[in-house]
Amino acid sequence: MQAPQSKEEKQLETSLDDLLQRVRELKQGISSFIYKLENDYQNISWPNMMEHFGVLSSGLSTTKRLLKAEKMPLLRNYVLFPILLSPDRDPHLEKLTEGRVLAFNHEVVPDYLRTKPEPEVEEKVQLLSVKASSITPEVAQKQLTALNKITSNILDIINASSDEWDKDSNQKNVVPSTSSPQDTLTLISAITKGSKLRRPDPTSMQQCPPMGPTQQQQMQQQQQLQPQKPMPVVGRVPSTIKTNIKAAATSHPYQRP
Amino acid sequence: METTSLAPSLKNIAPQQEYLLQASILDANRDVLLHRLRGLCDNAESNFETFADYEAVYVLSFLESSAVQQSQAVSFRVRHALDDPEAPDHIRYIGQAELGDRARPTLVRACLDVACSSNVREFLQEMGFKLDYDCVMKGYFFHKGRMKVTVYKIFRLLQPGKTDSSNWEPLSMSHLVELSVVAPLGQEQIGEDMKNFAEQLKPLVVLEKFDHRRLHN
């Protein structure tokens, strides 16, 4: 009998050590966070804050996992009962609790060693359970189905809208499509080089003596005459420009070599 | 030729440079951009400032060979406001984009703006310039400090010389967006400011330094 008992005790000891370690880490995290909030609150940013909360919540969940782990003996099977209460100050206890509990006396023991809820809470629970037991099973069933219905409806709504949000955000991420690179190119080349804006217009320079009809212009004229034919709209109007320029050209007082 | 010495001497009057970033936005998303710009720029409380300009580009080429014609030609852009008949005409010279270093956040080019009387077209033609191309630009105008933002649509004129709106044909389904600052030589800080401003318009429009040498006619 001796051996297994000591093994169990050993297990209890190690798991308690683990638990203590975790709780200590958690406590450290909380206290550093509080310190930061109290003394360095100007510099704390929202993401920073969230980070702290994240660390704390992950600490809590690891502690919880540890309690549920298989190696952990069922702690509720162990009973702690006070043998001696004393109103005197206990320096050892004070040191262990870091100054929070000064003495193991009648005042603090009920609070620290409580295993049941407070009497008022118990009363309330009692009241509720009486009320619950007073309902007939049929009514209870009805209420249950109604509640289930409402819950599933709400769940549907939430799922639907979350799908929509996902779709929305996906669409936003995938296709920004507020501009088209092709159009950018078209517009910029139009504005800087005149592409698509330049009209085939051989007559504008034809009668312009100041420059003298150069070879290049003649070449241009020949090139531009061809595409002009299928476009009667454009072809009809340059004639006005032609006469304008002719008038301007004849009145030109300077002669060029 | 007289005109060869003309361009440099004009440049010496006021050596200004234009810092430029460009992008475009689809017509459907224009209003979103306009509202964002209104919030970002000066005079947020007043209504959008609009403009409608007719621009004609006059070119004078000196060389016989057509291969180098594009780079050797001098061109002037003459604008006049269609929505404000009182406003003077405006002539603008724009140089080639400076090669400079690649790390520069914006395109930089020489630029010269002069207000002038409305007979400037005849004057240019007398000097031997010919009309290269023309268009109508209609859109919105914002400013923030000395940064100027224009959001406008480019229209081709169906029949030359007629600037009433029935004669316009949009060039594309987008508006051109330009962020520009005209400043004296050597103010590199502006480029950074413009880049920061452009950041705030992402991802709606991504204003970029556009290499104009990549463009083809």
Image (cartoon, coloured by chain):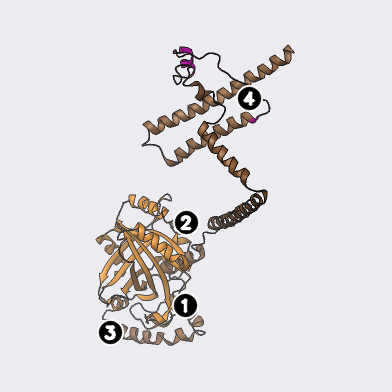
Chain colours: A brown, B orange
Q: Which mark is residue A219?
A: 1
Secondary structure state at the residue bearing disc 1:
helix
Q: Are marks 4 and 1 in contact (CB under 8 Å)?
A: no
| In the foreground, A97 or B65 | A97
Residue B31 at what x, y percent from top left?
42, 65
Residue A119 at what x, y percent from top left?
52, 31
Q: Disc 2 and disc 4: Cα gap in Å?
A: 57 Å
Q: Disc 3 and disc 1: Cα gap in Å?
A: 26 Å
Are marks 2 and 1 in one subunit? Answer: no
Q: Are marks 3 and 4 in contact (CB under 8 Å)?
A: no
Q: Which of disc 4 and disc 3 is earlier in sequence?
A: 4
Query: To which residue does mark 4 refer?
Result: A75
- Callout 3, which amino acid? Ser
Magenta: predominant secondary structure element? loop
Looking at the image, residue B100 lies above or below residue B116: above
Query: To which residue does mark 3 refer?
Result: A251
> Residue at point 73% right, 13% down?
A3
> Residue at point 35% right, 87% down?
A243
Q: Which of disc 1 and disc 3 is earlier in sequence?
A: 1
Q: Which mark is residue B203?
A: 2
Residue B146 at what x, y percent from top left?
30, 57
Q: Which residues are magenta?
A: A68-96
* Chain to which the residue tagged by mark 4 belongs: A
| In the foreground, A24 or B147 | A24
Secondary structure state at the residue bearing disc 3:
loop
- Callout 2, which amino acid? Pro
* Chain to which the residue tagged by mark 1 belongs: A
